[in-house]
Image (tube, grey):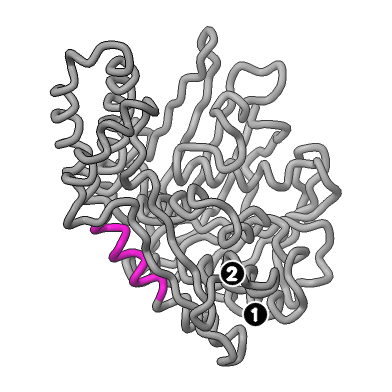
Amino acid sequence: MHINEVSLTGFRNLNVQNQNLSPGVNIIFGNNAQGKTNFLEAIYFCAFGRPCRARTDGELIAWNETVAQIRLETERAGITSTLDARLEVVGKKTAKYISVDFLPVKHMKDLFGRLLVVMFSPEDLRLIKAGPAERRRFMDMEICQLSPVYYSDLREYHRALKQRNALLKILQKDRSQVESLSVWDEQITNFGLRVIKTRAAFVKKISAISAEIHKNITQNAENLLMEYRPGLAPDNFAAALEKSRERDIFRGTTCEGIHTDDIEFTINAISARHFGSQGQQRTAALSAKLAEIEIIRQSTGEMPILLLDDVLSELDEHRQKFLLEQISNLQTIVTCTGTEKFPGKNFLLKMSDGRPEVV
C-alpha cells in the first residue's frame, strides 16, 4: 500500500495542500525545526489515532489555532481510500474525529490496519537499552495493527487495572470492600492471559525474522535472540495476583501483571541491554524494526509504509547501506538535512517553514 496525497492544516507548523507522494522513496529535507518530523507524525497519527511524540492530542494543534485537519489519499491493492483525522479544541479538552471514506470510525480498533505503517526514529534505537515500557509499546503498536481483538483485550485489561488500583487505594483506609478485589482480579486474569498468549506468539515470530536480518547485517558473526518475559507466568497468573494482595494494598497499586512484561534481547547468549556495545544495541534495534515490515507482509500480503525520521545520521556507513537496500520495494518517507546519502532517483521535497516544495 502507499499514500498518494497528503493535506494538512493547523497541524503543528504545517500547511500542506494536496501534496503528491511517490510510491517509492520520498525524501523530505531541509533545516531543523521546519516541520519534517511533524509531517511523519501526521501520517503516524492517521495509522494509530495517537501521537508518536506528543503527550496529548492537543499538542498537535498549531499555536493560536483551534482545529487541526489531516487528509490522506491512500491506495491499497489498486483501491483508493480517503482517511481524515480532525482535532478540535472544545473547552479545555481536545475532541478527535477520524473517518475512512467519510464514514466515522467509532472505535479505535476499527482504525488499526487501515494504514499500515512502520516508523523508525532515533528514539527507536533506544529499544534495547531503554526501560521495559519502551519494549511493551513496541509490541503493542505492532500487534494492534494486525489484530483489533488484541487492542480490545489490552484496553479491557487496563480498564480493569485502573479500577483495581482505585479500589486498592480505598482499601488502604477501609478494608471492608476487600472481597471486591475478586471481581477485578477475574477480569485482569482473563484479559491478561489473552494478551500474554498474543504477545508470546508475536515475539516468537519476530525473533526468528530479526535473527536472520541480524545475521545478514553482522555477516553471521552474531546471533540475536528475543525472548518474551511476562510479568506473571500464565499457569500461575490468578494465584500470583491473589498472593500479592497485601503488598498491593500497602502500595496502593497492582505490582504484577502484563503491565510489567518485557522482552529480553541477547546477542550470542549475552544480554544486549546490559553488556552490548552501542553498535550492537543499534544493530539489534534495526533488526527488530526491519522485522516488523516482514511480519506485516506475511500477515496481510501488503507492504507497509516506512517512515524514517533522521535515522541515517545515527547509523554508521555499513548499517546505512543495509537499511537503504531494504527500502527499494516499499513506499518510504525519509526526513533528513541533506540528500547526498540517497543514491538513485528519488522524489525530493524541501521543507521550509512548514511548507514542502518539490525539487
Badge 1 marks a residue whose secondary structure is: helix
Percent position of residue 13, x then y: 73, 32
Residue pushed farthest bottom?
Answer: 220
Identify which amino acid the numbered label 2 is placed on: Leu
Residue 341 occupies which quadrant of the picture? bottom right
> Tags 1 and 2 in contact by the CB under 8 Å rule?
yes
Magenta part of the protein: which range? 197-207
Q: Quadrant of the N terminus?
A: bottom left
Badge 1 is on which residue?
A: 322
Q: Please, what is the dominant secondary structure of the magenta stretch?
A: helix
Residue closer to the observer: 277 or 331: 277
Instruction: Give the mark, 1 or 2, whose residue is nearer the N terminus.
Output: 2
Percent position of residue 51, x then y: 54, 38
Q: Is residue 51 left or right of residue 199?
A: right
State the separation of the CA atoms marked 1 and 2.
10 Å
Q: Is residue 27 left or right of residue 91?
A: right
Badge 2 marks a residue whose secondary structure is: helix
Identify which amino acid the numbered label 1 is placed on: Phe
Point out which mark residue 286 bears.
2
- Picture residue at 23% right of the left edge, 58% below the top: 197
